[in-house]
Amino acid sequence: MRLMAVCHDSVGIGHLRRTLAIAERAVQTIPSCRVLVVSGTLHASYYSMPDKVDYVKLPSLRKGPDYRYCAKSLGVNLQDIISIRSAILTATTASYRPDVLLIDKSPLGVQGEAETALKLVRDRYPATRVIFGMRDIEDAPEQTKHEWRKNGHLEALKYLADEIWVYGDPNVFDAAEAYDLPIEITEKMHYVGYIARAACSHTATIKPFDGNGTGKRLLVTVGGGTDGFRLLDQFLSASPQFARNLGLHTKIVGGPDLPRAQAEQLRQRTTQFPNAEFVDTAGCMGCEYQKADAVLCMGGYNTMLEVLQLGKPMLVYPRVEPRLEQYIRARRFAARGYCEMLDPNCVNPDRILEAVGHVIANHRPGEVQMPNLNGLSNVAERLGRLEAAIRDSVAVFV
């Protein structure tokens, strides 16, 4: 079975990490499966591709100060870079001839770049199953409904998608209800559960603290780091004495997309903060989560799910621009006891440290009913059914 996974990639690394997790599980559980990931992220080469998985690199995009898309590296205008990406997508689809085309986040790709490829599949390869995979929350309901109407997403979901997989739990957030989706779309929807990677298989080495060995390990992470400066700046602006009183030993991971000038400023400031270190990236974030006594993070999908799965106390400082996706997720999770949340509009540096101390002191693991975290298994099961159907259709002609 040939699976082609088109990965949304303009900001951060979350979509790529989720797509690679699905690809890895698919090839592990379906012997015939081969996966081609198509993404524009500059960070794809940082990841070890699982066996039977490869990727095609599109020219990279970013969002400018006005939150509009633009070329990240090439210096061409938006229309030209979308044309280049669309041509690569269409040619790749035509040559690879996928049995399953899984497209992430935007049903037509960034700025409609995948529309030609999708129509080619419908015209030339009608047996190919087109699946739209969406995370639990896109944005505030009214904004999402407006964008989907404006950009033709609703029509694409009606006429170009065979199935819609929601990577979430409707008991936490019901996308069909929130976004007021019509019956032609909701009847294609399957809530497969959250995509949460299993804990890494490494043995996390936990070094004893210097001195008497007291204190707690705090991990501060901002995902890819594109918009992580505000949280890190506020954290490092807290009272050093307050930090000493809490006895924290802090590791800050800035992320590969944290702008270099900001990273250097924060690195210097970290040297003046008690018992703290700053790194750009970590070899394995799974190991870092396991070593931590508590995690201070933004509200990104992957981070929150991986910390939740490990049962670690979590304090979330979500972004509120340009989308409310992280804020909504953090509020829903906090209401169910999965984390505690800071309102980024009503917080100061010492309040962050105070909240960290409260999270550590009051964490009671095992006292909340967890959401559906079986997304990887359920996605693999659905892909397995599609693979069996493909084999059966071929057997008719043998």
Image (spheres, rainbow, N blue to C red):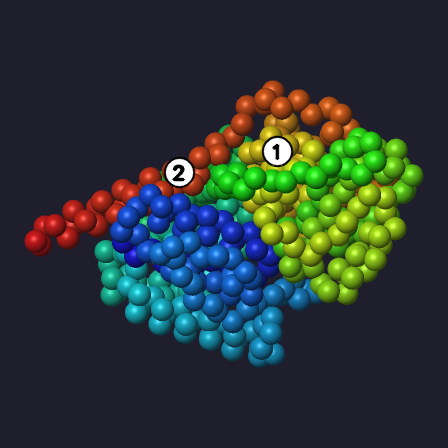
Residue at the image point whose x is 78% and y is 28% from the top: 358
**Disc on res. 390:** none
Total label count? 2
Looking at the image, is mark 2 or mark 1 earlier in the sequence? Answer: 1
Residue neighbourhood size for the residue with mark 1, other residues' Cα within 10 Å, grouped as few (<14), some (14–19), many (≥20): many
Residue at the image point whose x is 73% and y is 24% from the top: 362
What residue did someone put label 2 on? 377
**Percent from the top left, x then y, of residue 386?**
27, 46
Please tell me whether mark 1 sits on a helix, a strand or a loop: helix
Q: Is residue 35 left or right of residue 193?
A: left
**Is disc 2 in contact with disc 1, using a CB cutoff of under 8 Å?**
no
**Residue 153 appears in view:** no
Q: Does 396 sit above or below residue 119?
A: above
Q: Does 371 sit above or below residue 276?
A: above
Q: Is residue 74 left or right of residue 389?
A: right
- Tell which of 375 and 129 is nearer to you: 375
**Disc on res. 333:** 1
Residue at the image point whose x is 56% and y is 65% from the top: 42
- Tell which of 86 and 315 is nearer to you: 315
Q: The disc labelled 1 sits on which kind of residue?
A: Phe
**Percent from the top left, x then y, of residue 64?**
66, 66
Q: Residue furthest top?
A: 367
Q: Is residue 136 left or right of residue 186?
A: right
